[in-house]
Amino acid sequence: QSQLPDSTLNIFGQTLLDGGTDSQCFILCFSPRTRFNVFREVEPVELPNCNFVKGIEAGSEDLEILSNGLVFVSSGLKYPGLKSFEHDKPGKILLMDLNEEEPTVLELRIIGSKFDLSSFNPHGISTFTDEDNTVYLLVVNHPDFKSTVELFKFQEEEKSLLHLKTIRHKLLPNMNDIVAVGPEHFYATNDHYFLDPFLKSWELYLGLAWSNVVYYSPNEVQMVADGYDFANGINISPDVYVAELMAHKIHVYEKHANWTLTPLKHLDFNTLVDNISVDPVTGDLWVGCHPNGKKIFFYDPKNPPPSEVLRIQDILSEEPKVTVVYAENGTVLQGSTVASVYKGKLLIGTVFHKALYCEL
């Protein structure tokens, strides 16, 4: 896994001319503190019965629950500027079965002669189930910190993923999350405009709001929305939802037959919103959040990043109901990114830490 030079200001400004502490002050003292929620402390909201998922120790940045209770988990993300507990190991896709009494995980074997496992660095994921019940898994991958989408076919009997193809495109330079609308059709967020790590850090510091959403198909690729201060999670049902991390917003768009998007509304929050899951039964949104951006971007084991899960009901109504379902100061769960529900249970994932399974 290649690393950025120590003398380069990385994506979150952790090293500036080899002066990490100075650059942290530079970013946090001069960039608007409200964007990072520097002073936010979490008021705990507990759930009655929570347990760690056995086998997840180095992140569960995104997860996708199928209708039968099987779960794909993206684990082991290395992202410039963020903590990693397994920086010397490739990432992996894990499988869980939420129908089990105490779900554990197994690593899915990836097969396909042209796929480079050694540089696998999975980020956002999404599934698409075809008419013949074939399940395709689409994975945002960052080999050597570039951006690709890896298309896999899930082989349930063999507990494996068959790699079908790698997708690259000039309009997809900095992908974060993805939502599939076909086996090779998807919307994806780019969380930055620039490719250069130094310029990325300035983009974040200045709050340039130049990131975007792109629609991809084999025959057509187009930018469908832009102007985000760090576009992050994306989902669909049937409207399209986009999380704008540094602006603390979730945007709602109407999707048209030609795949373009029309803005409907946005919601503001007092937290950095990451990945969005949609409850297929109720249509509620479940969002993994970072209450304090400073703590997630500048990791301190003595003062770890907190976790927060929001539930949003009736998002299109004049007064959507927003509930903090879970909140914790980081002593239990660090850096929540995603939350999803299945039959009265809540599964919470993190950037680089563990995963929590709770009763609602």
Image (cartoon, rainbow, N blue to C red):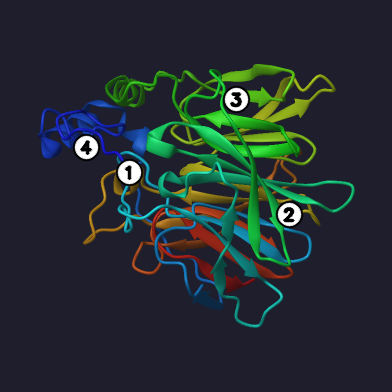
Residue at which label 4 appears: 14
Q: Residue at x 36, y 62 (%)?
A: 330
Residue at which label 3 appears: 213
Question: Is the residue 325 above or below the residue 266 in the image?
Answer: below
Question: Is the residue 261 above or below the residue 113 in the image?
Answer: above
Q: Earlier in the sequence, mark 4 or mark 1?
A: 1
For the residue carrying disc 1, how many other residues have a C-alpha within 10 Å: few (<14), some (14-19), or many (20+)? Answer: some
Callout in the foreground (1, 2) = 1
One can see residue 318 in this view: no
For the residue carrying disc 4, how many other residues have a C-alpha within 10 Å: few (<14), some (14-19), or many (20+)? Answer: many
For the residue carrying disc 2, how many other residues have a C-alpha within 10 Å: few (<14), some (14-19), or many (20+)? Answer: some
Secondary structure category for the residue under label 2: loop
Residue type beneath disc 3: Val
Residue at which label 1 appears: 1
Marks 3/1: CA–CA distance: 27 Å
Callout in the foreground (4, 1) = 1
Marks 4/2: CA–CA distance: 37 Å
Residue at which label 2 appears: 279
Q: Earlier in the sequence, mark 4 or mark 2?
A: 4
Q: Residue at x 70, y 55 (%)?
A: 154
